Amino acid sequence: MNFTDVLISVSGPGITHAHATVDETKDVSMEIINRRIFNIYHDQDLVPWTDKQEGLIQIVTCPSNFKRIECHYVTPLFCHVVRICGNPRGFRVNPDICLP
């Protein structure tokens, strides 16, 4: 973490209370964590609730037609963000991976 510019987490667990006990992060200050972590997740995803989130957080509303577990999957989150935000760079997205 001390040599990383930014860490992007998709539906990652929080790190506030656990960071001091995990060997990889115990020597990293909360200031560095807050400057370098970006986490995006659905509001109904349970995994990000396992600990308090730090850093830049973007919460996306989980569509009402999603099952609770689908709020944690990366593919539906990606498809939802592309639908909401658009795809200005024209990345090719396989429509078969996105839920109707």
Image (cartoon, helix red, strand yellow):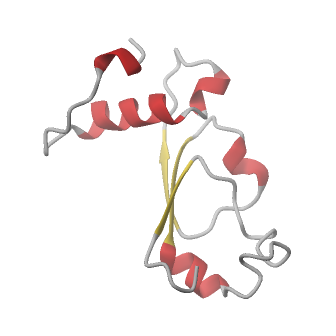
Residue at 21% across, 37% down: 86
> What percent of the width, then of the height, locates residue 96?
35, 15
> What percent of the width, then of the height, locates residue 27?
73, 88
Residue at 30% across, 35% down: 82
Residue at 38% across, 11% down: 100
Residue at 63% across, 52% down: 12
Is 44 or 75 nearer to us in this picture?
Answer: 75
Quadrant for residue 6, please give it.
bottom left
> What percent of the width, then of the height, locates residue 3?
51, 84
The N terminus, quarter of image: bottom right
Quadrant for residue 78, please give it.
top left
Task: Note whether 36 is above or below 82 in the view shown.
Answer: below
Total labels drawn: 0
Task: Note whether 8 is above or below 36 in the view shown.
Answer: above
Residue 90 seen anywhere in this rendered image of the structure: yes
Seen as rendered, the residue at the extreme top is: 100
Quadrant for residue 23, please give it.
bottom right
Residue 98 seen anywhere in this rendered image of the structure: no
> What percent of the width, then of the height, locates residue 34?
56, 77
Task: Note whether 38 is above or below 87 in the view shown.
Answer: below
